[in-house]
Image: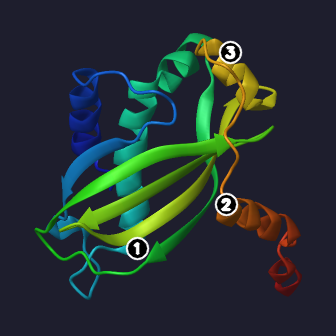
Amino acid sequence: MYPFARFAYEALAARKLPPLGLLDPHVSRHTCWPWDLDPWIELNNGRTLTLYDLGRIPFAMRTGIYKALRANKWGMTVAGNSVRYRRRVRAFQRFDMVSRCLGWDSRFIYLEQSMFRGGECTNQMLLRQAVTDKAGIVNPQRVLAAMGQDGKSPALPDWVQAWITADALRPWPPESTRLL
């Protein structure tokens, strides 16, 4: 089940925090609860993605993205991600999450989110996010204009650019559809 109570807590807490610039990091603290675990008694990989929501939504609130979405009746959706897992997070362990925007192109906003325990990174996600309306994807330049900001993106890091290139080579629809 989606962690609605945790989501509400994070959203309410974010309202009390100072605003952030779009490229500034949002840092939040979380706990791995028993319902976040997999059969090996560690943070479930699917739940990791859900917990990253708990960092992204307050980030969007603090940077003004959320306000622009509401004012324009836009939505926001995950359009792709890649997660690298390096250390286990076990039951009742606390961890810090850092969420930050790396930049954008003509269609997507690219975010990096990482979880840290004791100063050591446990996992990291690169996420491609799209703002949407009834017609489809909203150009990030429009989103930034709605936020009252300049639409010029910083240069995306080489590793992000390589991910974008590799993902563009991936066949769609997947070749596995021939098996059905």
* Residue position for label 2: 160
Q: Can residue 115 be seen in this view?
A: yes
Q: Can residue 172 be seen in this view?
A: no
Say which amino acid is labelled 3. Ala
* Residue position for label 1: 45
Residue 67, percent across and down? Answer: 49, 17
Say which amino acid is labelled 2. Val
- Mark 2 or mark 1, earlier in chain: 1
Residue 154, percent across and down? Answer: 67, 40
Give the number of the disc on residue 145: 3
Q: Residue at x 70, y 46 (%)?
A: 155
Say which amino acid is labelled 1. Asn
Quarter occupied by the N terminus: bottom left
Look at the picture and state if 119 lies above or below 39.
Answer: above
Quadrant hosting residue 16: top left
Residue 134, percent across and down? Answer: 75, 25
- Mark 3 or mark 1, earlier in chain: 1
Tell me which colouring the rendered structure shows: rainbow
Q: Are marks 3 and 1 in contact (CB under 8 Å)?
A: no
Q: What element carries label 2?
A: helix
- Crowding at dot 3, Cα within 10 Å, few <14 / some 14-19 / many 20+, comes out as few
Look at the picture and state if 126 lies above or below 13.
Answer: below
